[in-house]
Image: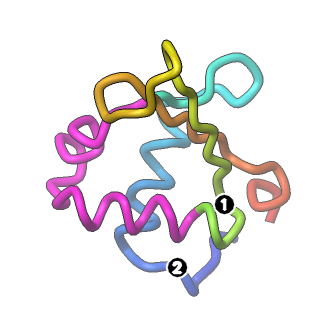
Amino acid sequence: AFDKNIGTSETIIYAIITKYSDNETNPLKATLNFYKHWTNLDKTTIIRTLKNLVEKGYINKHEEVINNTKTCGYSSNYYKLLNEKNNG
């Protein structure tokens, strides 16, 4: 059963990550605009929601820096579902 202590935004974002990722070969790599398109949430809410899911142990975040530059245009975040929450 899903954790009843997480909010609606968290549930929606988690469902999107579940739908569009394959944890073994292809963690979801998505922009804030991708989440905004599918949720109609503002960017601040999306960032806060992703952070909450990481802190609560539902997803893992991996930052990637390209060409030694960490900026919005050149860095990507990968989000991967964590197995212990998937079985739960």
Above-or-below relation of 84 to 28: below
Q: Position of residue 45 (x, y in %)?
A: 28, 67
Above-or-below relation of 86 to 64: below
- Which image quadrant is residue 7 in? bottom left
Asked whether 46 falls inside the magenta stretch, the response is yes
Q: Position of residue 18 (x, y in %)?
A: 55, 42
Any mark on residue 6, and which?
A: 2
Q: Residue furthest bottom?
A: 5
Residue bearing mark 1 = 58
Could you tell me the amino acid type at mark 2? Ile
Q: Is residue 8 left or right of residue 79?
A: left
Q: Main secondary structure of the magenta part?
A: helix
The quarter of the picture where the N terminus appears is: bottom right
Q: Position of residue 79 (x, y in %)?
A: 57, 41
Residue positioned 57% across, 28% down in the render: 64
Which of the two labelled residues, at mark 1 and mark 2, occupies the earlier sequence position? 2
Residue positioned 43% across, 44% down in the render: 16
**Where are the magenta residues, as a range?**
30-53
